[in-house]
Image: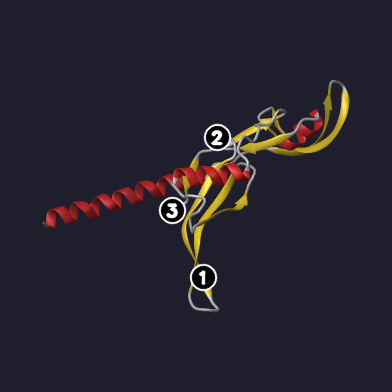
Amino acid sequence: MKDKVKGLVIGIAIGSLLTGATVVAAQDVHVQAIKEKISMFVDGSSKGSTQALIYQGTTYVPARSMSESLGKSIGMYDQNLYIGKQPVVKVTEQQAIQLVRKKYKIAESSHLYVEVDSETSTKYTVHVYEVVQDDAETSHTATYGWYDVDKFTGKITSMF
């Protein structure tokens, strides 16, 4: 038994030393980059200026500045960057509610409320709850679940 405990302690100590050495090594990395204001031209026409980073001969500019200079829209959807044509929202707010009702078998006549609580550019957050009457004057809500509904695919993800 003592050998197992000793082995565990030694293993944790070695692991801690290796992890600590990795963190220290990562902190010693220095990048030499130049921050510079540059003018942007598209097809020979000036489209304004932006701040850029120049590192090892490569110029990095913000995607929004580039899309605006090209006259294209820009959007971030599900960890993907779109410049120009944007994905089409295929699921409306009402459809998101119906998808949640269907998946969790909540009838329209049910005592449960199914409502879109909030939305982002990529999803609706749907709240399913009931109102519980405490007495003649007070009530509270009892949540059954929170669900994210993807606006583009209709995929439902439970938040719990």
In the rendering, at what x and y percent does residue 153 appear?
Answer: 55, 34
Q: Which residue is mark 2?
A: 153
Seen from the viewer's position, the closer of residues 55 and 141 is 141
Above or below for 84 versus 36: above
Residue drawn at (58%, 41%) of the image: 95
Left or right, 87 with reference to 44:
left
Label 2: how many Cα within 10 Å (few below 14, some 14–19, many 20+): few
User: Is residue 67 or residue 119 the one in the foreground?
Assistant: 119
Disc 1 secondary structure class = strand
Left or right of 33 on screen, residue 114: left
Q: Mark 1: give few (<14), some (14-19) or many (20+) Cα within 10 Å.
A: few
The residue mark sitting in front, 2 or 1, is: 1
Residue found farthest to the top: 43
Q: Position of residue 2 (x, y in %)?
A: 12, 58
The percent position of residue 114, horizontal first and vertical second, equals 54, 53
Circle 3: element type: loop
> Closer to the camera, 110 or 82?
110
* Residue at image coords 79%, 38%: 50
Residue type of the residue flagged with mark 3: Phe
Q: Which mark, by number, is residue 160?
A: 3
The residue located at (40%, 50%) in the rendering is 20
| Residues at marks 3 and 2, CA–CA distance in whole angstroms | 20 Å
* The N terminus lies in quadrant: bottom left
Q: What amino acid is at disc 1?
A: His
Q: Is residue 112 above or below residue 137?
A: above
Where does label 1 land, which residue? 140
Question: Which of marks 1 and 3 precedes in the sequence?
Answer: 1
User: Mark 2: which secondary structure?
Assistant: loop
> Residue at the left extreme?
1
